[in-house]
Image: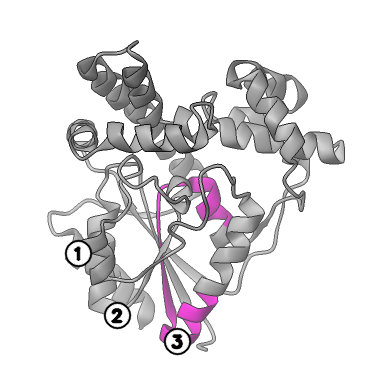
Amino acid sequence: MPVNPLVIALLGPTASGKTALSLDIAERLGLEVINVDSRQLYRGMDVGTAKPTPEQQARVRHHLLDLREPDQPITLQEFQAAAEPCIEHALQTQGIALLVGGSGLYLKALTHGLKPPAVAPQPQLRTQLQQLGQEICHPLLQQSDPTAAAKIAPADAVRTQRALEVLYATGRPISSQASATPPPWRVLELGLNPANLRERIGQRTKALYQNGLVEETTALAERFGRALPLLQTIGYGEALELLEGSLSRERAITLTSQRTRQFAKRQRTWFRRQHTPHWLAGEDLVTEAMTLIEGHLR
């Protein structure tokens, strides 16, 4: 392995074009893509998460997709345990690893070597938290661990439940237990933040509904129940309300676009504060990205 192997992290808000650019970079360098999108870790959540299509996966091999069923939440520690061997294999065989995704905490955990608390899932507690509902759980977290609550979106049931799980299992807030051991890699962060992101989100949202989001939501609800936390996330939540008759299709699309724009804003804030990417802004993103990469390989 090279003394200083290179990890490329392609990051950016949802609908910014990460998948398309990652395929071009991977093909030019002969790399495989390591997914860092927290919802794409789950099987059966293809349309709503804009998971790379079978055709795209045929072009470039992808890792860390479809790891578990949606009713089996993956903790940050479990994600790291799955991701790190993928990274090490890429570094040993190619000298370069390509991480792609918009889940900022997951990405930072890999590139900065965050060490989350080693607390096993608590099924009984999770069931109780799900029954309480997110409208109770997030305020509860705000009271018990305001630092963690400030970093978790009010609608993010999975991370809220995990923070409460760690608190009740250890008696200590999850925010007080984080540590970091930076890995021995050089990291090149490439960021996408297109000026027309609002329009891109609108187009992406319409495509999700056209490509089967409602049908996918129906299948997930029938198999795992409508209380599944991941069915409360962006896109699925609105599709579920459409199925229940409380939203029209047009209104569901509007709300999904709105929630996605709000999420993208939070992503951009995270990336500005927690990462130092080279923001790609030229007309030829592939050439710009490859120039930066080649500069780090010299």
Q: Residues within 10 Å of mark 1 (few under 14, many from 20)?
A: some
The three-letter code of the residue at mark 2 reads Gly
Residue of label 3: 93
Q: Are marks 3 and 1 in contact (CB under 8 Å)?
A: no
- Within 10 angstroms of label 2, few (less than 14), some, or many (20 or more) residues? few
Residue type beneath disc 1: Val
Residue marked by disc 2: 30
Between residue 200 and residue 252, name the one nearer to us.
252
> Looking at this rendering, what residue extends furthest in the right direction?
171
**Residue 275 spot, x, y in % from top left:** 48, 50
Amino acid tagged 3: Thr
Q: Relative to 257, say whether 53 is above or below.
A: below
Q: Residue at x 30, y 43 (%)?
A: 47
Residue sitting at 25 percent across and 65 percent down? 23
Element class at badge 3: helix
Quadrant where the C terminus lies?
bottom left
The single residue placed furthest to the left in the displayed view is 283
Q: For residue 170, which quarter of the picture?
A: top right
Q: Could you tell which of marks 2 and 1 lies nearer the N-terminus?
A: 2
Write the start and end of the magenta stretch as one range: 87-109
